[in-house]
Image (cartoon, rainbow, N blue to C red):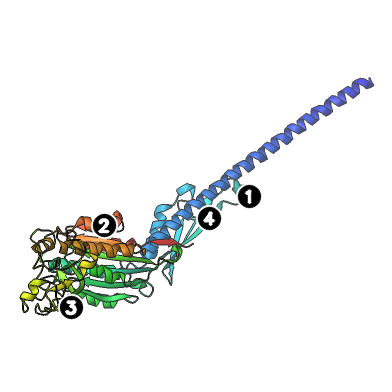
Amino acid sequence: MHGNSRRIVMHNTISNQRGAILVIFALGLVVLIGFTALGIEVGQWYITQAELSKAVDAASLSGAANISNPYVSVTSLAQDFGMANFQPGYLDTPGTGTGTVAFTATTSPGGVLTVTGTTSAVALLASVFGTKLVAVSSVGAAQKNSVQIMLVLDRSGSMAGTPETDLQNAAKAFIAYYEGTQNADEIGLVTFATSVTVNYPLNTYFYTPILKALNAMNATGATNTEDALAQAGANFADQTQVPPANRIQQYIVFFTDGHPTAFRGTFESNGTNYDAVLCSTGNCDSSSDSLYSKMGSPSIENDWYNTSTLSPSPTGDGLPVGTTKCAAAKQYPYSKINTKWGSFASYPVSSLGAVSYPTYCSNNTSQLLTLLNGQNGYICTTARQMAIDNVNQLKARFVQFYVIGYGNQIDSTFLATVASGSNYLFITPDSSQLQSILSQIAKDIKLRLIQ
C-alpha cells in the first residue's frame, strides 16, 4: 500500500515539474520574441535616423551652394530640399500632426549654413511601456570653400554690340552671386584685346569696382590671350608647397570669342628694347592672316608705336644701321632699320632652327616672311602656344580653368586644352546664354561638409 502511494506521489511530482518547465519555456519564448521584435523596432529607428541625416546633409549642401546667391532664400531652399528627400510618412513616420518631419535652417558668419531635421518614429512594441513616438533628430552644416577667382574677359573688336552687352550683364550677375561674401571671397578682373588691363587685382570687396569696370568695357583691338592669362595668373599665390587640405581653391574663368591673334614680347630696334604687342591682321583662322604693320602698347588700347620708332618688319638683330649684320638694312639706313623679335629665342621659327643672323634678317630671307603669315604661320601658332604654356604653368600650381567660348570663330581645340576638363568647358553660339553659363559656373564652386 505504501509502495503504491510513493509511486503515485512521484508520478504527480514529475508531471508537475514537466508542466512548470513548459510554462517557463513558454514565458521565456514570449520574452525572447518580445526582445527580438523590440530589437527590430530599434533597428527601424536607426534607419529613420540615418535617412534623416542624409536628407539634412543634402539640404545643407544645397543651401550652402547658394549661400551668396542674391536670387534665392537659402534657408527656404534648404528646408525645401530636406523635405524633398524625407517626406512626411516616409519610413512609417507620422504623415500629419505630432511628430511630422520638419526642417529648420540658419546661417551664421563665414558662410556656414546649419540645417536641423526632426521627426518621430512610431513605437509599436515600445508602446507597451507607454512610449508611442520616439523622437529622432539630426543636424548638419555646410560651408562654401574659400575661393579666389580671376575673371578674364575678351573685349576685342569682334565683341562690339550685343555680344559685349550680354557679356557685361553676365559678368555682373556672376559677381552679384558673391556680393554677400565679398568680405571673405576674393575676385579680380582682367579684360583684354591688344592690350591687357588688370581692372581689379584679386582682392575682397570687389563688387563695386568690378561693376564699374564692366560698365566701362569697350570692344576694340586684337586678341592677346597669352598675356591676359599670364597677368591673371600672377595674382595667385603659388600653392605648390601647401598641403592639399590647406589650399585655397583658385580659378580662372576665361571668356573669348576668337583665336589668339597677338602676343607680347621684347623687341629691339636701333639698339633700344621695347615692350610691345605683335598682332595678326585677322582671326588666325585663314591663310590670308598676316603681320599687322604696327605694334601695340601692352597696357593702353589703341596706342600704337610710330613705325619710325618701332616697326615689326623687317626682322633682324635690332642693332643700329652701322653695326647690324643684316645687309639690307645697311643699304637703306632711313627706311629699313630692322627689329629683333625676342620671341625668336624661346619660340624659334621651326624650319630655321636656332636664332642666327643674317638667317633671321627678313630682307635676306624671303622664306621668313612667308613663314610668319597665315593661320599656321609663326604669329598665330606662337600666340596660341604661348597661351597654352602660360596655362600649363598655372595648372601645375593647381589653378583650375573654366572656359567659355562664344560664336563661330573660336578655336574649340585650343579652348578644350585650356579648360581643366570637359565639365569646365562651355561653348555657345548665342551670347544671350552667357548669363546662364556664368551663373552655372558660380554654382559649381566646391563645398565641404563640416559637421
Which comes sooner in the sequence, label 3 or label 4? 4
Name the amino acid type tagged 1: Phe
In the picture of the structure, the residue carrying the numbered disc 2 is 417
Residue 45, position in %: x, y?
54, 49
Instruction: In this rendered view, identify the residue nearer to me: 126 or 96.
Output: 126
Q: Quadrant of residue 444?
A: bottom left
Which-is-in-front pick, marks 1 and 4?
Answer: 4
User: What residue is shown with label 1?
Assistant: 129
User: Which residue appears at 35% of the width and 66% of the height?
Assistant: 250
| Gap between marks 3 and 1 measured at Cα | 83 Å
On the question of residue 100 being in view, the answer is no
Task: Give the spatial CA distance, label 1 vs label 2.
Answer: 68 Å
> In the rendered structure, are the residues bearing label 1 and label 2 in contact, judged by CB atoms less than 8 Å apart?
no
In front of the other: 283 or 140? 283
Q: CA distance from mark 4 to mark 2?
A: 50 Å
The residue that appears at 56% across and 53% down in the rendered structure is 134
